[in-house]
Amino acid sequence: DIQMTQSPSSLSASVGDRVTITCRASQSISSHLNWYQQKPGKAPNLLIYGASSLQYGVPSRFSGSGSGTEFTLTISSLQPDDFATYFCQQSYVTTWTFGQGTKVEI
Amino acid sequence: QVQLVQSGAEVKKPGASVKVSCEASGYSFTTYAIHWVRQAPGHRLEWLGWINTGSGSTRYSQKLQARVTITGDTSARTAYMELSSLTSEDTAIYYCARDQWEGLHNWFDPWGQGTLVTVSS
């Protein structure tokens, strides 16, 4: 299986901050990388697919970039609703695997 | 709207089996595959398997393939995940999610609300 590693595992930030989360794959996955947001007690919610395509309805402050083995999720100006855990997922090999998550806290 | 609604929480004894359902609405059930994913305390999301709801074909994670069975009932627009020989390690929230694709890319959207399965003696 392809191993996905996120960094950092958690971070503290303030409203208005620019936040960047990194996801690294154990082998090249081209641009087959998705990002999800999960709030406590809720299911994951898709933010970005194909490394950089914004899901319909997701605010434009979220963006994704990268290809190969290194990817980033950026929140340009953190809002109160963005405090959550973020996961990356590879879809290059169809035994889909996820990163361990990055918790964004106040 | 597109929605997946799962069955309620379960408490099972070690060695038992559990069957979780996932009812789809708002789209053509047989057009999109359904995945099952679990989230155990302190662990990352783990993909369990998926079902092609049109053909009924399935594929499972190598780790769980001996214990997991995914089925579908097209008339009920419902997918099921059954896990046997439960241990405390299977205590987790189990999610179903619809497979979505565009070109060569695919992702999971939407997800069901999750079903907590607790394995305890």
Image (cartoon, rainbow, N blue to C red):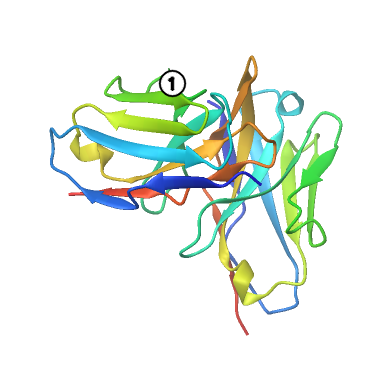
Left/right placement of residue B48 relative to residue A58 reads right
Q: Could one spot residue A54 in this view of the protein?
A: no
Query: In the displayed structure, would residue B62 be above or below residue B91?
Result: above
Q: Does residue B36 show up?
A: yes
Residue labelled with disc 1: A52
Q: Looking at the image, which is closer to me, B89 or A74?
A: A74
Total numbered labels: 1
Q: Residue at the spot x=26%, y=23% of the render?
A: A61
- In percent of width and height, residue A20 lies at 28, 35
Question: In front here: B28 or B69?
Answer: B69
Q: Quadrant of residue A15?
A: top left
Residue shown at the point (77%, 72%) measured from the top left: B85
Q: Residue furthest top?
A: B103
Q: Amino acid at mark 1?
A: Ser
Chain identity of mark 1:
A
Front-lying residue, B78 or B68: B68
Q: Residues within 10 Å of mark 1 (few under 14, many from 20)?
A: many
Kindly state the secondary structure of the residue where label 1 is placed. Answer: loop
* In the displayed structure image, the side of residue B70 where residue A15 appears, left or right: left
Classify residue A77 as left or right of residue A9: left
Q: Quadrant of the C terminus of chain B?
A: bottom right
Which residue: 59% across, 44% down? Answer: A97
Q: Is residue A55 left or right of residue B19?
A: left
Name the spot of residue A81 as percent of width and height, x first: 24, 38
Rendered location of residue B48, percent (x, y): 68, 51
